[in-house]
Image (cartoon, rainbow, N blue to C red):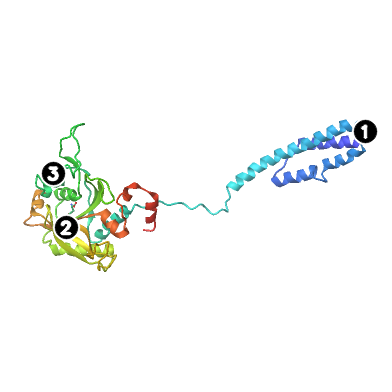
């Protein structure tokens, strides 16, 4: 009996100072004390030999010992379990999560492509304000005072004072041609610039129209610039943008700031010019307006029209993007829907 008591005291002492350096060591301790052949289990086996009158007290002592061992081992296990979980979280052998890259906006992609194509033949980029005055958007570009483009229907006018409805001469530019006048009044020829930017028109928003969109304006002023130069540059652009088989055609048109003026079509690349639903059976799709800068415009910007001549052209970035990527609804460009934008990942 004394032997069992001694063993109990002994194991109690060991349990009080129980330590382990790893999860495996804790498991070894559990086996040492509590498994089928463990030291505490062995004591329970000896219990049979304890005299009747001592059984109750000894039973209590043994139960208390087993409980102490279970609690101590559970405490140690908890420490290492927390550590183990932490290690699992920082599994250095795991393959990394893929980083989801954003995409560039299709309009930015196309604008950069246009700028890049013209940069290769010497055009630099010029910038101008979006909030403009009547003079730079219309007046200096040879728009007659009563020209319909100045009408409230088309142009967003900026109110001078709160509540004042009367049109003022401060407005949101309706086209990037306004940058032409800014450049011509601040630089001397030769001028060879490209002016990308946002423009605003007072239109109801639908699949085919928006109150803001993007244009790229081109301007070249020098001595002896001819319509043939314009045609050649535009043919180069069309082939670079839409492929080497692309054809162009120029149709007479009218713009106040160019004389003569033209609209340019490219051969429909869907049907190869044979005629399809996209080009309405004509084999051609319109992409830009252009012409020789009107001498009135040169003079209003302080450039001698007897010495210098030049050409200008202007195109809609949305239009070019639609032709390249067949986007059917203009609103997609400004809705920032990831499902739409994601499709330009590889562009
Ligand atoms: N500004 C015109 C528009 O918004 C486009 C344009 C046509 C620009 C002919 C030009 C040009 O420079 O020569 O519709």
The numbered mark, 1 or 3, whose residue comes first in the sequence reads 1
Q: Secondary structure at mark 1?
A: helix
Give residue 250's position: percent from left, percent from top.
16, 63
Q: Residues within 10 Å of mark 1 (few under 14, many from 20)?
A: few
Q: Which residue is mark 1?
A: 52
Do we see residue 194 in this rendering?
A: no
Q: Residues within 10 Å of mark 3 (few under 14, many from 20)?
A: some
- Dividing the picture into quadrants, the one containing residue 262 is bottom left
Q: Nearer the viewer, residue 335 or 222?
A: 335
Q: Are marks 3 and 2 in contact (CB under 8 Å)?
A: no
Q: Which residue is mark 2?
A: 290
Mark number for residue 190?
none
Q: Which residue is mark 3?
A: 135
Give residue 307's position: percent from left, percent from top.
7, 57
Give residue 315's position: percent from left, percent from top.
22, 55
Which quadrant of the figure contains the N terminus?
A: top right
* Residue at image point 82% right, 35% down: 63
The numbered mark, 3 or 2, whose residue comes first in the sequence reads 3
Give residue 60's position: percent from left, percent from top.
84, 32
**Left or right of 229, for residue 41:** right
Q: Residue furthest left?
A: 306
* Residue at image point 89% right, 40% down: 46
Within 8 Å of ligand 1, the CB of disc 2? yes
Q: Nearer the viewer, residue 56 or 192?
A: 56
The numbered mark, 1 or 2, whose residue comes first in the sequence reads 1
**Left or right of 210, for residue 219:** left
């Amino acid at each position: 009996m004394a032997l069992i008591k001694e063993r109990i005291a002994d194991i109690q002492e060991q349990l009080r100072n129980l330590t382990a350096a790893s999860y495996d060591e804790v498991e070894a301790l559990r086996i040492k004390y509590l498994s089928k052949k463990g030291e505490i289990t062995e004591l329970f086996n000896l219990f049979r030999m304890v005299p009747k009158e001592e059984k109750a007290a000894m039973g209590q002592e043994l139960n208390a010992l087993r409980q102490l061992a279970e609690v101590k081992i559970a405490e140690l296990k908890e420490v290492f379990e927390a550590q183990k979980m932490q290690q699992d979280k920082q599994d250095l052998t795991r393959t990394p999560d893929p980083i989801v890259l954003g995409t560039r906006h299709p309009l930015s992609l196309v604008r950069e492509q246009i700028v890049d194509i013209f940069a290769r033949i010497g055009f630099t980029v010029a910038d101008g304000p979006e909030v403009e005055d009547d003079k730079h958007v219309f007046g200096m570009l040879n728009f007659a005072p009563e020209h319909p483009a100045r009408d409230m229907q088309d142009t967003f006018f900026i109110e001078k004072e709160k509540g004042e409805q009367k049109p003022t001469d401060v407005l949101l530019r309706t086209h990037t041609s306004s940058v032409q006048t800014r450049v011509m009044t601040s630089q001397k020829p030769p001028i060879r610039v490209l002016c990308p930017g946002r423009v605003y028109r007072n239109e109801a928003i639908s699949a085919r129209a928006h109150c803001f969109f993007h244009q790229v304006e081109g301007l070249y002023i020098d001595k002896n610039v001819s319509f043939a130069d314009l045609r050649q540059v535009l043919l180069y652009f069309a082939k670079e943008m839409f492929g080497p088989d692309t054809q162009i055609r120029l149709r007479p048109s009218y713009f106040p700031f160019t004389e003569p003026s033209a609209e340019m079509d490219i051969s429909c690349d869907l049907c190869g010019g044979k005629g399809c639903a996209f080009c309405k059976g004509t084999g051609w799709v319109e992409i830009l307006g252009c012409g020789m800068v009107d001498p009135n415009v040169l003079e209003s910007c302080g450039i001698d029209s007897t010495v210098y001549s030049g050409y200008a052209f202007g195109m809609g970035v949305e239009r070019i993007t639609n032709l390249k990527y067949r986007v059917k609804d203009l609103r997609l460009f400004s809705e920032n829907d990831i499902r739409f934008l994601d499709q330009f990942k590889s562009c």
